[in-house]
Amino acid sequence: MGLIAFLLAFSFLGAAIFQAIEGDNERDEKADIQWLREETINKVWNASAAVKRNEQAFRLLMRHELKK
């Protein structure tokens, strides 16, 4: 029983230390990913409005954007 309690406490302590060290970096990464998602959505929206009904041109433009 003592070993299990020690392992649990050690695991929680390790998780808390890791969160304290890497927490800011994770928040920054999530913000960057969210910005990229929004940027991609805007590009797709603008491209779809510009291309109108030319599906082949739209697909070509989207392939180019997604490869970036």
Image (cartoon, rainbow, N blue to C red):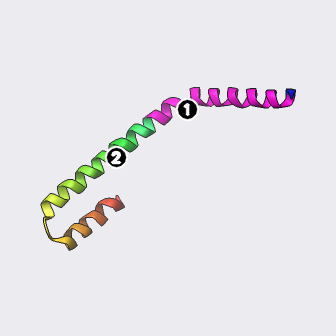
Q: Quadrant of residue 54?
A: bottom left
Q: Amino acid at mark 2?
A: Leu
- Residue 39 drawn at (x, y percent): 28, 47
Q: Is residue 38 left or right of residue 3?
A: left
Question: Does the magenta stretch mainly form a helix, a strand or a loop?
Answer: helix
Q: Is residue 45 left or right of residue 26?
A: left
Quarter of the image with the N terminus is top right
From the image, tell me which residue sits under label 2: 36
Please say whether residue 4 is one of the residues in the magenta stretch. yes
Q: Quadrant of residue 2?
A: top right
Number of numbered tags placed on the structure image: 2
The image shows residue 24, relative to residue 36, as above or below, that is: above
> Dot 1: few (<14), some (14–19), or many (≥20) neighbours within 10 Å?
few
Q: Quadrant of residue 67?
A: bottom left
- Residue 48 drawn at (x, y percent): 18, 60
Element under label 2? helix
Along the viewing direction, whichever of 49 and 35 lies nearer the viewer: 49
Please say whether residue 47 is one of the residues in the magenta stretch. no
Q: Which mark is residue 62?
A: none
- Residue 33 drawn at (x, y percent): 39, 44
Report the magenta residues as a range: 3-27
At a point 43% along the width and 35% down the height, the residue shown is 28
- Residue 9 drawn at (x, y percent): 74, 26
At a point 27% along the width and 51% down the height, the residue shown is 41
From the image, tell me which residue sits under label 1: 22
> Dot 2: few (<14), some (14–19), or many (≥20) neighbours within 10 Å?
few
The image shows residue 60, relative to residue 2, as above or below, that is: below
